Image (cartoon, coloured by chain):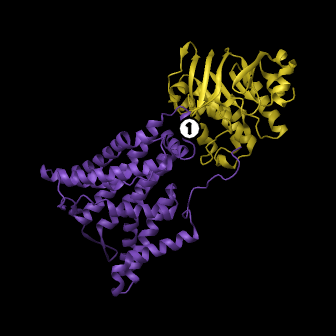
Chain colours: A purple, B yellow
Amino acid sequence: MEYIVQQVLNALSFGAEYALLALGLAIVFSIMGLVNFAHGEIIAVGGYTMVAFASLAIGNPMIVMVGAVLAAMLASLTLERVAFRPVRKADPTTGLLTAFGVSIVLQNLFLLFVSPRPIAVTSLYFLDWSIEIAGIRLASLQVFETLTTIIVIIALMLFLRRTVLGLAVRAASLDFEMVRLTGIRANRVFAIAFLISGLLAGLACIFIMARRGSVDPHLGFEPVLKAFVACVVGGFGSLPGAVLGGFLLGAVEVAMLVMLPQSLGGMTDAFVFMIVAMILIWRPDGILSPAVEKGDKL
Amino acid sequence: MLTIQDLHVFHGPIEAVHGISLEVEQGKCISLLGPNGAGKTSTISAITGIARSTGLVRFEGRDLSRDSVEARIAAGIAVSPEGRRIFSNLTVLENLTLGAALQKDAAEKAKDTDHWFSLFPILAERRDQSAGTLSGGEQQMLAIARALMARPKILLLDEPSLGLAPKIVRQIFDLIADLKTRGMTILLVEQNATQALKLADYAYLMSSGRIVAHGTADDLGKSDKLMAELTGVA
């Protein structure tokens, strides 16, 4: 029983991390058709902010966490302003290449100005201890991660349904020009999308750092790759799809870890991607891909 | 109220409108007629700032030609665009809420929503329904109501009757007539010249990016040019 609960929580917390990151990718993609591969570097910015706090001898975990999230939001907003705004009207390929470029530039900045080696960040270890709920021992970090993600998803849903700017973000995924014709400034809609994306990356950063305990220039690569896969599985551009894809990917990963015999342990990812491929054969556009209007526009 | 002088409109390198001038007076309904591809929608896009254009667009004495789309909307221009372009992934109510995006006062917004719901009972019935599930006529009403939520000083209606059944077309034109009696200034783009001329105080006839005739609705209705342009029979 304990084993099952632990594995379910494992799956949920893996899934939560992927869902947070996939949502960050999806919200930007939904309004500007851009797959922001620099999203991983936003996570790294959060990680290096924690390093900066540590070197300033600021250990208050609240300051460290809030600071990292704010830094990630600021970084995301800056990227929109500096790198993505100029190519907003360009071909989607241009946007994709810009994102790769930004990603490489940021990684090299970390390499040059910080360090190519991993730097330890110990200020968040306190999040991870062993708790006992109804006689079952669980890792607190996983409980926090799952709960945080659920709260974030609910908050995001409320924002997208209850506020004018949230409605504009949803409407913009369908017809950006028409949103401008209601008088809402396009720049505000893009800025809010990138802010939310940065917020989600910052939150994911806290959990990634608490688990890994170190940051290096390539920290963001693997998480963003997984988030990308989650988006593809869920249906690119669909926010519910990103969440579903994230949790599904987490569940499949944990299932593989648990079920594969020891001798195949190194091939977990291979099996995970095989299952992903099978899902895509069944639903080539992803499970919850947004309906494309195929008929006459009138 | 709205003055357009020597307006050239471009889609990429192609010039779609070759220097037109027109005038919309306060409280009047002005109709812009012409066949497909005459440049009517391009003219509307230039007024809202969506399409690149040269020439003068003056609204209430202010030159808008260099202003952004958002600034022009804020100045009091609202549009019900060609193809309706309602947000089909949002509910009817959410569409209206977005229409009043610049209205900061929540109470006023609620008042306007109730007002337009009372005028469009069918929309009120479907307020929480996804707008994509509405029929064509209902979607057109929603597009007009969404534009009206902005409390515009001028309403640009681009082909409101396109693709609708005759009975629904009559409903839409009744609605426009009603708006006119309430004092709304309207620029109506139409291919349906007969209906549009019944409503309009003054009309312009466009063909191949130029204004080829204009006059009061009565005069233009009798002119041979109108029939020739619209039917292609000289």
- Whether residue B151 appears in this view of the structure is no
- Where is residue B15 drawn, in percent x and y? 62, 29
Which of the 4 quarters of the picture holds residue A123? bottom left
- Image quadrant in which the N terminus of chain A is located: bottom left
- Where is residue A294 drawn, in percent x and y? 67, 53
The residue drawn where x is 33% and y is 53% is A103
Q: Nearer the viewer, residue B184 or B216?
A: B216
- On screen, residue B216 versus residue A56, left or right, reads right
- On screen, residue A73 versus residue B167, left or right, reads left
The residue drawn where x is 82% and y is 33% is B170
The residue drawn where x is 38% and y is 62% is A225
Q: Nearer the viewer, residue B20 or B153?
A: B20
Above or below, A123 against A282 in this view is: above
- Image quadrant in which the C terminus of chain A is located: top right
The residue drawn where x is 38% and y is 74% is A269
- Where is residue A3 drawn, in percent x and y? 36, 81
- Where is residue B84 drawn, in percent x and y? 67, 38
Give me the chain letter of mark 1: A
Q: How many marks?
A: 1
Which of the 4 quarters of the picture holds residue A147? bottom left
Above or below, A3 against A37 in this view is: below
Mark 1 is on which residue type?
Glu
> Could you classify mark 1 by the number of other residues whose Cα lies within 10 Å: few (under 14), some (14-19), or many (20 or more)?
some
Above or below, B225 against A255 in this view is: above
Q: Nearer the viewer, residue B62 or A105?
A: A105
Residue beneath label 1, please?
A: A177
- Whether residue B179 appears in this view of the structure is yes
Above or below, A2 against B54 in this view is: below
Disc 1 is placed on an element classified as helix
